[in-house]
Amino acid sequence: MNDRRLRKIVILGGGTAGWMTATALAKSLGRRVQIALVESDEIGIVGVGEATIPTIHWFNDLIGLDEAAFLASTKASFKLGIEFVDWARPGHRYFHPFGVYGAPSPGVPFHHRWLKARAEGLARDLPAFSLATRLAAENRFAKPVSDARSILSTLGYAYHFDASLYARHLRGLSEAAGVVRYEGKVARVEQDGETGFVTALVTERDDRIEGDLFVDCSGFRGLLIEETLHAGYEDWSRWLPCDRAVAVPCANVGPLTPYTRSTARAGGWQWRIPLQHRTGNGYVYSSAHLGDDEARETLFANLDGEPLAEPRLIRFKTGKRRRVWDKNVVTMGLASGFLEPLESTSIHLIQSGIAKLLSLLPDRDCDPHLAEQFNRIFAADMDNIKDFLILHYHANQRPEPLWQYTRAMPLPESLTFKEEAFRRSGRLMLGTDDLFRDASWLAVLRGQGIDATDYAPAADGIESATNLKQLREIDEAIARAVPPTPTHEAAITTAMHPQTRTAVPAQASATHQPTARVQAIGRERERVVVIDDFAPDPLALRAAAAELAFAPATNFYPGVRASVAPAYFNGVRDTIAEVLRDVFGHAGDAKVLGAWYQLVTTSPDRLQPVQRIPHFDATEPGRIAIVHYLSEDDQGGTSFYRHRATGFETIPQARAEGYMARLNAEVTASKPPPRYIADESPLFERIATVEPKFNRAIIYRSFQLHSGAIPSACTLSDDPMRGRLTIGAFLAAG
């Protein structure tokens, strides 16, 4: 082996950029090259929720990403494109779809065939020939297929995900592949006195991490590339004047849309990114045209649901480093430069940088020719994306000062050339390496009000009647494809649980094998039975819940309920009977006292005092409770408690009167704060928690003190496909 090869690569910074880089390098280089990552929990990451573009699939394939695990752990949703609202002018909207317009065909590009047909009287607008656009309008989703004869082959898709959860997911993959993480802030950067190469990072904990190649993922600061090597920065704010963003997540309201939404505002634009557990929102604005307080007020006035956190202010300067690879330092992510997330390019630029680094991976001497090639290609990528973003701002008819400025500002020559070529002949002057292809430029050019006045002469080689007939056939094929396509929520559920795609009988079968474990908790050692894969067809249960009319619970349950059909027990009766017999000592059939679908919908500030503390359901030892989780993992499980004053963990009949008297006195003296008791309180000590999992059930005696462990990020929705859906059942055992 050549002893000039890299022996150790050190990544500075975690977050999305750092852990994407670590995962890709570890997966690609194996353990022959040591990979170390240095980050500090004290330094936050900028990521507030990420939207991606279809190139994300390259990265996923590179690292062997399991899509089901990724969707579940990052609370991801699918993305068919971006809706732009009020950009060209107030009251106007258009959709930038992923995939292509029309259907695959050799020869003349589809949009020239459409332009020819329009000139000859066709009334159907171009978006009607995009399957992605029409699916998105109905909140449906499908993946593309490889058969070019299918209209589904025209689709493209990407993801929305929680950036912090994504980094955590990738960290797990990285560390499993051998990446070593060092916790701590960098106190000192050591350099070679002759070459200027970085040789080591020294943390405040006195860890000294040496390396041959350093990847700077330290964000806007650019600790290595800028503060150490002084690479310089090219400012693009004359074209892209927004320099701040305020971001806040909010509760999901309404259907889960399979697209990002971008809404133009007076001082910039607002993003909306739908995730399974919340909606990400932010207002990107120009501080020269809008104050921070006004930006915050505008954002909060235009949220779908209640805010779930305090807003975060992010300052930035649009542009790029003059050198993104200098000496033995390569940058990724925000350390390389910044383009506002208008077209969701942040993740792409990270993975594009990773691809370039793998292609140009140096030896320990870091040949400067490799760095020069990397810098040239990266600069071209940034320039192409920059032009595409400027197009959104330049072509507008909005009245506010910011938009007047961007409408009148001088454009890069490269963008002027593209606009004029399209106006004259409908031609799209794109390079072979341009990120955004025909459908993207078509959508935004036309959406922003720039239209073609002619089409390519080659389209005249297609007989008019034939062309029109084929376009109508494509339109009809798209119309037929939309109705049977699943809703976005259903598509996510199926993707996360691929083993449930084929329907199974309602009753238990030989292939349905629940797995159970018994936990003895607390000092009293009461038993809680946890059963995974509880029901044979959990997706059918969710679908059934979605068809029901829920009503407010009549007891103290903090939400809404709907009755469960008796047939539910057909698939779980044997499992329940075995638990009652072997764990709780109850033979024979148990009587079902009640069973309900349940959704937690009450906001913490509306909880009654009794809903803020643990409770028991009954005092008889033969009364049994079942909670069956049918929503996603982060919606909260169930916790069990000990009453501090009495030490009671269970409330049988003999304890009930004394316990209630003591508890009432405590609550009267000090009312519990308005929140769900997800952990502990001055009155109660948590002794155990069962984490939620799709199709997991727990069975326990009703006299145990317990409470739903409702997290602050719980989706308080009455939609069974998005909220904290459980089945709660009560049994009387003999």
Image (tube, helix red, strand yellow):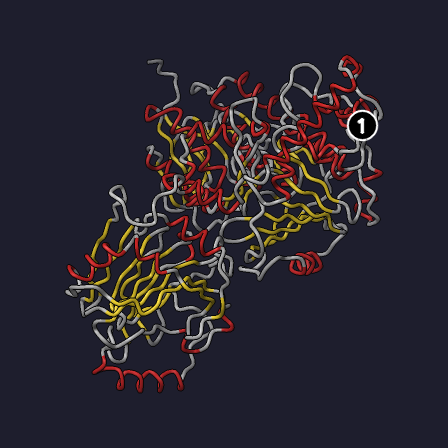
Describe residue 341's horizontal placement relative to residue 77 as left or right.
right
Q: Which residue is mark 1?
A: 118
Question: Which residue occupies the foreground of this view, 591 or 268?
Answer: 591
Query: Alpha-carbon neighbours of circle 1 within 10 Å: few (<14), some, or many (≥20)?
Result: some
- The part of the image, by quadrant, that contains residue 585 is bottom left
Describe residue 44's horizontal placement relative to residue 126 as left or right.
left
Query: Which residue is at 79% across, 49% downward?
Result: 90
> As displayed, is residue 346 above or below residue 274?
above
- The part of the image, by quadrant, that contains residue 692 is bottom left
- Per the image, label 1 sits on a secondary structure element best described as helix
Residue 184, image x, y percentages: 40, 46
Q: What amino acid is found at the position of numbered circle 1 in the picture?
A: Arg
Query: Which residue is at 49% across, 19% downward?
Result: 359
Can the viewer see residue 202? no
Residue 442, image x, y percentages: 72, 30
Can the viewer see residue 111? yes
Question: Which residue occupies the foreground of this view, 369 or 535?
Answer: 535
Question: Which residue occupies the foreground of this view, 252 or 181?
Answer: 252
